[in-house]
Image (cartoon, grey):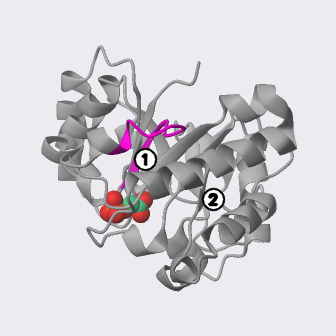
Amino acid sequence: MRRKLAAGNWKMNGMQASLAELARLAQAHRDSAVEILICPPATLLQAATAYAPLTVGAQDCHMNASGAHTGDLSAAQIRDAGGRAVIVGHSERRADHHESSQMVRAKARAAQAEGLTAIVCMGESAAQREAQNTLDIIGGQLAGSIPDTATGENLVVAYEPIWAIGTGRVPTLAQIGEVHDFIRARLERRFGAGVGRSVRILYGGSVKPDNAAGIFTVSNVDGALVGGASLTAAAFSPIISALDAV
Ligand code: PGA
């Protein structure tokens, strides 16, 4: 009942020439059962909407609908450019832009109010995992970052251990499963079984063609949020195919 989702986060990468990668992906996966979402930089957002069946999202949005916020994008502007989703609360934004869970929750609510799917990211640091605080941290981020307006359509949760992002290090499958099962149980407890079971939970952090298939066998892993390996069709395509094969 949950459609698998392969989401690519291009971060601050990608030029006009990179759109050729989207043409390749769209061609290779035109009959995919998996939803394929690309979150390019804002400069490419509108152009990226030309590659159905790929859908397009942004990497952040402001919590306000409009106004004097130099450099920011509103959820309505993302929607207006053809975006269908937005990543909020990525660890790079929590760290680089001092975004609290309270701010992430306001951004997610703003996105949902505009009809966008909010992909709410959370994850523990290496020190927090070593101190065996992972589930406490995730529990706190879930409670703090997710608005009460969540439904299976307007919310995706991405579990991204900070120490796994861009490092080539990945948790064991048991560690991924423990956190995903925990997130599922918390969503069901807060929103009820109907909504709690319909929200998709993505794993992110060094997902690559050679580890994707294993990760996708883990319970409550409904797809991946992929950074570096989403930048080229050559790397992202086998990850999408692995998800399609689950
Ligand atoms: P990575 O990034 O796949 O390059 O580790 C994942 C992310 O930050 O979403």
Which span is picked out in magenta? Answer: 215-226
Looking at marks 2 and 1 on the same chain, the residue that comes earlier in the sequence is marked by 1
Q: Mark 2 points at which residue?
A: 61
**Frontmost residue, 229 versus 232:** 229
Q: Can residue 159 be seen at all in this image of the molecule?
A: yes
Q: Mark 1 points at which residue?
A: 45
Is residue 246 found left or right of 223 in the rendered image?
Answer: left
Q: Where is residue 123 in the image (x, y as percent from the top left)?
A: 56, 66
Q: Where is residue 225 in the image (x, y as percent from the top left)?
A: 43, 50
Mark 2 C-beta to ligand 1 under 8 Å = no
Residue 226 in the image: above or below residue 49: below
Three-letter residue code for mark 2? Cys
**Frontmost residue, 229 versus 59:** 229
Is residue 233 found left or right of 2 in the rendered image?
Answer: left
Residue at 33% of width from left, 31% of height from top?
A: 243
Instruction: Assess disc 2: are there few (<14), some (14-19) or many (≥20) residues with their C-alpha within 10 Å of its C-alpha.
Output: many
Label 1: element kind: helix
Q: Is residue 34 magenta?
A: no
Residue at 66% of width from left, 65% of height from top?
A: 135
Three-letter residue code for mark 1? Leu
Residue 54 in the image: above or below residue 95: above
Q: Position of residue 211 (x, y in %)?
A: 25, 49
Marks 2, 1: nearer the viewer = 2
Identify the mark at residue 162; answer none if there is no mark: none
View quadrant of ligand 1:
bottom left
